[in-house]
Amino acid sequence: MAQTARDYPVPPNFWDPRATTEETGVPPETIQFLATDDYPPFSFRDSTGRLTGFNIDLARAICEELNAACSMRIKSFDALIPALMREEGDAIIAGLAPTEANLKTMRFSDTYVGLPARFVALRDEEVQAIPEELDGEKIAVVAGTMHERFLHRFFTLSDIAAYETRDEARAALMEGKAKVYFGDGLSLSFWLNGAASQNCCKFAGGPWLEPGYFDRGLSIAFRADDALRQRAIDDALRRLQAKGTYSELYLRYFPISFY
C-alpha cells in the first residue's frame, strides 16, 4: 500500500527526469488540439466568452515550448474521439484516461494530472489518516465506488459507512456522524473551496495513489500512429515541469491543492 506521509503544495513530478530531448526527434510544426468548453476549471468560457482553463493554458504553454503553430477546435466530449479518428485534430486535451478500451485505438502522453484519493476531516480535528490511527473510527464513503473498495481492502478495522450519494457522505462528516470522509481529491478540493462545505473541513493526511485503485490520471490522447506528437508533447511537459510553469498553472486553477 503506497501512501505519502505529507501534503504536497504542488503536484508530484509525473515525468521521468532521465528522459532526454534526444528521444523525441524533430518536434511537429503544427498541433491542432481538440477540447471541450464546458468543464471548468479545465476548459470553459469566461464572462467575456474567452476560452480559458487549465487544459487550455497548458496546451498554449506546450505550443510555446515546442515553438509549434497550434490551434484549438472545440467539440462536445462525445465527439472528441471520432473527430480525432477523422483527423480533424491531432491531440485531445480533455481529461481522457488511458483506459484499456482507449488504448486499443489511441496512444497517450504521460499523465499531466493525477487523481489521488483524499481523506477530509473537520477543521478543528487533527487526524492521522492511516489505518492504525482510524481503527474503530467511522469513515464515510460513497457506496459502490473504488474508494469504498479501497477502504474494505486496507482499512479493515475501521467502521466503513457507505452512503448512496456524495452529499449524504459529506453531510455525515459535517454533522459529526463520521470521523472522516474518503473520496476523490479533485472534487474535494472544489468542495472545500466552495460554499457547500461551509468552511467545515480540511484535507487530512496526504494523497493516496495506490496502484490498481487511484493510479490512472488525465493524459493527452493521439492517434495510435502519431508517435511524433506524443513524444514531443511528453518532452514539452517535462520541460514545463522543470521550469516551474506547470506548477504555476496548477496553482492558478487549483488554489486548494488536491495533493
Image: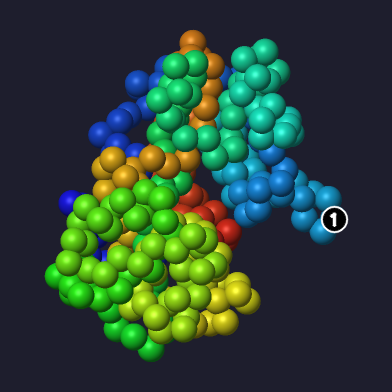
Give left or right: position of 136 versus 215: left
Residue 7 visible (yes or no): no
Which residue is situated farthest in the right direction here? Answer: 48
- Which of these two is toward me, 80 or 108? 80
Relative side of 136 to 72, left or right: left
Front residue (pair 247, 39): 39
Q: Is residue 27 left or right of residue 158?
A: right
Residue depicted at 28% across the width and 40% down the height: 212
Q: Position of residue 93 (x, y in %)?
A: 58, 35
Q: Nearer the viewer, residue 244 or 102?
A: 102
- Outermost residue, left direction? 132
Quadrant of the image containing the C terminus? bottom left
Measured as percent of width and height from the top left, residue 79 is found at: 69, 27
The answer to whether 32 is drawn above or below residue 17 in the figure is: above
Q: Position of residue 82 (x, y in %)?
A: 65, 19
Which residue is denoted by mark 1 in the rendering? 48
Q: Is residue 92 above or below residue 198?
A: above
Residue 253 in which image quadrant: bottom right
Q: Does any portion of residue 172 appear in the rendered image?
A: yes
Q: Nearer the viewer, residue 103 or 239?
A: 103
Residue at x-position 25% and y-position 76%:
137
Q: Residues within 10 Å of mark 1 (few under 14, many from 20)?
A: few
Q: Residue at x 48, y 50 (%)?
A: 246
Q: Secondary structure at mark 1?
A: loop
Give coordinates of residue 153: x percent, y percent.
Answer: 22, 52
Q: Amino acid at mark 1?
A: Thr
Total number of numbered discs in the rendering? 1
Give me the residue at 66% from left, 34% from top: 77
